[in-house]
Image: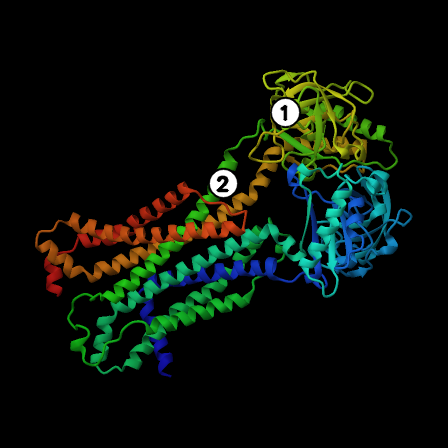
Amino acid sequence: MPFLHDLKIAVRSLARVPALWITVALTLALGIGANAAIFSVVRAVLLKPLANRDEDRLLYVRQSAPGIGDENATFSVPEIQDIGHGLKTIQGLGTFSEIDFTVVGLGTPREIKAGVVDGNYFEVMGLRPVLGRLLTAADDGPSAAGAVVLTNRFWTTSLHSDPSVIGKTVRLESCCGASSAVIVGVLQPSVPYPVETEIIGNVVTSPHHLSATMVTGREHRMTEVFARLAPGAQLETARAELRTSYAAMLAAHPEVYKPDDHFKIDVSRMHDQINSRANTILWVLFAASGLLFVIACSNVANLVLARTVRRESELAVRSALGASTAALRRSLLAESLVLGGSGALASLLIAAPMVTELAHYASRFSVRADGVTLDFSLVWFGVGLALAASVVLAYVPRLPSMNISHSFTLSGGGVRVTGASGRRLRIFAITQITASFLLLVGAGALMKTLYELEKTQAPFDTASVMAVNLPTMNFGKTPAQVGDFYRDVLRRVSSLPGVEHVSEGFSVPWRDTREQQIQLQFAVDGAKRQNGLEDWRARFRSISPGYFDTLGMPLLEGRDFKESDKAGAERVVIVSQSLAQTLFPGQSAVNRELRWTDGVIKFIGISDEPRRIIAVVPDFDDANIIPSPAMAVYQPVDQEGWSSRLFVRAQHDPYALLPMISQTIHGMSADQPVERASTLGDIRGEVLTPNRLNAIVFGGFAGVALLISVVGVAGVLAFSVSGRTREFGIRMALGAQPRSILTDVLWDGLVIAGIGVVAGAAVGFGCARLVGKYVAEIQSPGLLTFVAAAGVLLAAAVIASAVPAARAARVDPVEALRAE
């Protein structure tokens, strides 16, 4: 077969230029592989249907109060009853409350993420069991027996898919008491939302959910609401009906829903809500991989066209010897297909490991990224596109006609670069620079954000302080006995060798986000807001004496809590510097009286009695890496509050103390979990991981794009220099200095890069403004980032131009003219 023979010749021909072959193959492999990998993740996370039945009818209902900074206020039981009454467009509401259970009876006791749901939840969510049954309306009510459903992931990973767990009784410990429950079923594989739970129980598994404060407290909000559209109903109609019902509720309770709080309700499809965190980052990443594909294709086109033009003399000779135009075109097609095919095959080797890494990256933003595998549909599409491009590139170059005197020279001179060929090569190079500029700007913006986060220092030595979770165990204990246990833990751990300070609190900085969101309204005698309102809001924190010593934070004024600050003694608090300066500018806040006025305090066991401010501490924003002025109030845990976190300040390595700490605590209570031990420095690093991954992934894309662009610019200039050898020889024969030739070629490279940078800047500014209108999370990279990206590309263009420019400056005029 003639074409098979052409393929063999193409392979032998390309084997003589391995640098070209390898460059084209790797460039295509990176472009196709990266796009196949990121599309696999995007499709699995954003586009793949949920396991839920009729997912297009599944809705998520959100209540928010922007006036008090609460973007997701969740719902209370009375609110759910009010908004759910008489709905026509909604077939049913399902409720979910996040809770932490310590499970006893399934191996080693440990604290796990769990949910408490009503009997409608699974029906509304459209889920089914793979083993046993799910919770139904028969499991509702205070007289029902405790029942739990295991999530599929927990059953398969922690219990090794053991079917005998059905019917087993377990004990569930929570902050408000203990209960027993029977495992009744295993849930089908599905997306865990709003949190990644391991077990889901009915209401009676949580003593707190049976309390009068939970059932009747309108401001006691801790429940998420899901809804299912009635058949034939539309989302907008359901949204309007819910807002009407919600407005009537607000009007009926003006004492709860204050105008300045701006309470509102919204409804979105469940699929969109689940993807909300991953949506922006993955589509931006997909756009970045698309830019990389454009750069790769442009570079390959440059290299193939340059090689084809270099072979014009060879093609002219073959034409003169009788080769037909079809035979010449077939030989170009064979060589182009070998280049494109080798790149496509190499992409298969790159795509599989790349999708594994990208799935790990995406799992930081969406639970749907777990277990993502390579989607071969886009791989084959990319392979097909590469082969189609190979065919197109084979038919772009102009071939010599039989009348060679009117087409190509047969002399031994260099290649004649036609204006069309040079323009094509420059257009491809400029395209690469433009796309590279956009990727560099994006990577620069992410690195700037990461730099701002990394350089922010906490107000204490995070490396020396270790946090340990000690979940509350209530079974068979009174509240007083629970408190005695924690105090005994402090005494015993503090006596261990190597322990400098020890204390307790109810949240770990940067990790326990749910607890850190607790803010309560308060009033202070003698302090008023400028608008005349008396109530302020502050973060509520309960801690033990020595907490600030453990963290290494000095008191600015006053004294620390003491062991005598307990129930029955004078109520005292410590406030943050921002609170003191805001309420009492230029004065001392110590000995002032503070009272909690928030309506929710009566539901969580916090008194509204006045309490004396005894100290002021520096601001410590334990919820955000980049701190902002934080109004906070600290209460002694022995008076009011909760405590299940142990903080240990070590003289040397905190982790070296963990075995002794665990042994000490287990000697006091064998069932007591000792979990998630980590230094605050490592916790901070874990919080920064998504930002680091963003910078690494986009920085990697930008680096590859920059490298490909450098090769492209260098290739264009090298081709240009080879075609202008005669011109350079004549100029040097007429007295031109090598420095002038060098400057000429360098300037040519800068012009290509400059045009690409200007085009990239125009596209970048336009896209940033367009996307910013629809996606709030996208922020403008800033002028400095644009300037830095331009500087990098211009510098890279100079470097890429250096070798061709040096070659041009070394042209021998005599040899150049002799060759002509």
Q: Which residue is mark 1?
A: 579
Give above or below for 294 relative to 657.
below
Along the viewing direction, whichever of 59 and 691 lies nearer the viewer: 59
Residue 69 appears in the figure: no
Is residue 63 rendered to the left or right of residue 353?
right
Q: Amino acid at mark 1?
A: Leu
Q: Position of residue 483 (x, y in %)?
A: 81, 28
Labels 1 and 2: the sequence-earlier one: 2
Give above or below for 505 relative to 254.
above
Along the viewing direction, whichever of 141 and 296 lies nearer the viewer: 141
The image quadrant where one finds the N terminus is: bottom left
Q: Residue furthest right?
A: 143
Q: Position of residue 334 (x, y in %)?
A: 36, 74
Q: Amino acid at mark 2?
A: Thr
| Number of the label disc, if any, that sits on residue 449 | 2
Q: Position of residue 254 (x, y in %)?
A: 75, 39
Label 1, residues with CA under 10 Å away: few <14, some 14-19, many ≥20: many
Q: Disc 1 to disc 2, how far (Cα)? A: 28 Å
Along the viewing direction, whichever of 735 and 223 lies nearer the viewer: 223
Is residue 3 rendered to the left or right of residue 678?
left
The image quadrant where one finds the C terminus is: bottom left
Q: Secondary structure at mark 1?
A: helix
Label 2, residues with CA under 10 Å away: few <14, some 14-19, many ≥20: some
Is residue 740 rendered to the left or right of residue 277?
left
Along the viewing direction, whichever of 596 and 189 lies nearer the viewer: 596
